[in-house]
Amino acid sequence: MPLLDYDNLKVTAATEIQNNLRENIIVKPREFPINIIAGADISFNKFSTTVYAGVILLQFPELVPVGYSVIKKEVLFPYVPGYLAFREVPALMEAWDNLPQKPDLLVVDGHGIAHPRRMGIAAHFGVVAGTPTVGCAKKVLCGQFEEPASIKGSHSPLIFKNEVVGAALRTKNAVKPVFVSPGHLMDVPSTIDIISQCIGRYRLPEPTRMAHNLVNQFRLGEISEGYTDLRQLPM
């Protein structure tokens, strides 16, 4: 995988990188089977240079965890809204590189093309890693939507500059929706379909919910850095 060094970038240079990467995004219907799906999340204090990143692998469609990779990395790119990928992607790439088996699809806690420059973390990571990705975020970054019906599974289009860039998806009855968008090698209907199959008991879909818990455990020192194969652990 590429060595990503964004530490000394200025925001103007980061904008140029986003604009260049955007030309390589492929948005299209899913054309591949999914046996292993992954969730990815990042944890950091906006005033700290330390980033904790994790990727968890799940058997699909059962959503049973089979392994995970976590790393801690120092990053110098500042906390700038709209450019968080420049803090997050290098750490996430190191966690990704530690995986002996790459997933068929990566679900990232964040946005895909539902971003002012169409380059949220899921899109950014998908292009540089050359892998299918989708974003699932808790809040809207850009665009407008109508509230979907209050029933679990309901969704409505997220529209930005007259383009459908994602969807508001209700994952539990009468609970705030999440916001899903393609990152790379997926389209909006495919993204809605897959995330709908990843809904469990909680508002967040299982891949990103488990990734969030994983990274917090790592940050608290409850698990060790590196790759762990859960299938090799004694029962």
Image (spheres, rainbow, N blue to C red):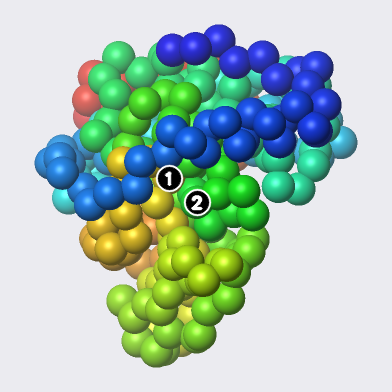
Quick check: 71 above or below 82? Answer: above
Q: Is residue 158 above or below residue 212?
A: below
Marks 2 and 1, how far apart in space?
A: 6 Å
Point out the tag, 2 or 1, that comes first from the N-terminus: 2
| Residue 44, percent from left and from top | 71, 36
Q: Residue at x 57, y 67 (%)?
A: 161
| SS for callout 2 | loop
**Where on the picture, by quarter, is residue 53?**
top right
Choose top left, top right, bottom left or bottom right for residue 172: bottom left
Residue found 36% across the figure and 26% down from its top: 130
In percent of width and height, residue 76 lies at 80, 21
In terms of secondary structure, where does tag 1 sit? strand
Snapshot quadrant of residue 101: top left
Q: Callout 1, which amino acid?
A: Gly
Disc 2 to disc 1: CB gap under 8 Å? yes
| Residue pointed to by mark 2 | 113
Circle 2: residue type: Ile
**What residue is shown with label 1?**
183
- Evaluate whether residue 198 shows in this view: no
Left or right of 195? Residue 143 is right
Packing grade of label 1 (10 A; few <14, some 14-19, many >=20) is: many
Q: Is residue 128 above or below residue 199?
A: above
In depth, the one of 73 and 162 nearer the eye is 162
* x 86%, y 36%: residue: 47
> Residue 34: percent from the left, percent from the top?
17, 41
Residue 29: image tag: none
Depth check: 94 or 32 in front? 32
Query: Which part of the image, by quadrant, shows the C terminus?
Result: top left
